[in-house]
Image: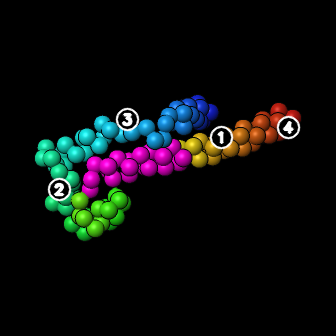
Amino acid sequence: MFYLLCTRLHTICDALENSEFEDEHPVEHAVTMVYTNLKNKEIRDIQETDLLLVMKKGDIPNVLQLFDGAAETKNITEASLRKWMVNQRKLLVHSLSSTSNVIEQLNKVVMVNLSFLCGVFCWG
């Protein structure tokens, strides 16, 4: 069972690693949804007042620092949101890859221990 879980996670990591990091097509739908929901279908950048609908006022400065130029202008442009989402996707892929490697190593340790225990009980 543990091995099947590891295999499934490894397959997900491989699929993400084989995708293009800089490809913005998978991110485009998410960017469009965020813009549509926060801007009330107006043609403009996301502003502080829009962010107040989904978060506390004290959290807004921390969020604005995540986007290029947003801390100064108090607006989140579509380009900066897209760039941030692509970067987050990269981080997720690397994190899943690291997790997959750790799980593979743990799987080997568990298999060696189980083999040792089976050997001890069979000979004993």
Q: Earlier in the sequence, mark 1 or mark 2?
A: 2
Q: Residue 40: where, in percent of width, then height? A: 13, 46
Which residue is nearer to you in this view: 74 or 106? 74
User: Looking at the image, is mark 3 or mark 4 earlier in the sequence?
Assistant: 3
Circles 1 and 2, Cβ within 8 Å, touching? The answer is no
Q: What's the residue at 72%, 44% (across, down)?
A: 109
Q: Label 2, on which residue?
A: 50
Q: Position of residue 23 (x, y in %)?
A: 43, 38
Q: Which residue is mark 4?
A: 124
Of badges 1 and 2, nearer the viewer stands 2
Q: Are marks 2 and 4 in contact (CB under 8 Å)?
A: no
Determine which residue is flagged by label 1.
Answer: 104
Q: Position of residue 97 (x, y in %)?
A: 57, 43
On the question of residue 52 being in view, the answer is no
Q: Which mark is residue 25?
A: 3
Residue type marked 3: His
Mark 1–mark 2 distance (CA, rounded to whole Å) = 44 Å
At a point 19% along the width and 58% down the height, the residue shown is: 47
Amino acid residing under circle 1 = Glu
Q: Quadrant of the C terminus?
A: top right
| Callout in the foreground (3, 4) | 3
Q: Are marks 3 and 2 in contact (CB under 8 Å)?
A: no
Q: Which mark lies nearer to you, 1 or 3?
A: 3
Q: Secondary structure at mark 3?
A: helix
Amino acid type at circle 4 is Gly
The alpha-carbon separation of the residues under discs 4 and 1 comes to 30 Å
Indicate the secondary structure of the residue bearing disc 2: helix
Q: What whole-number distance in Å separates the C-alpha atoms at marks 3 and 4?
A: 61 Å
6 up-or-down from 99: above or below: above
Is 93 part of what is drawn in magenta?
Answer: yes
- Which numbered disc, 1 or 3, marks the residue that appears first in the sequence? 3
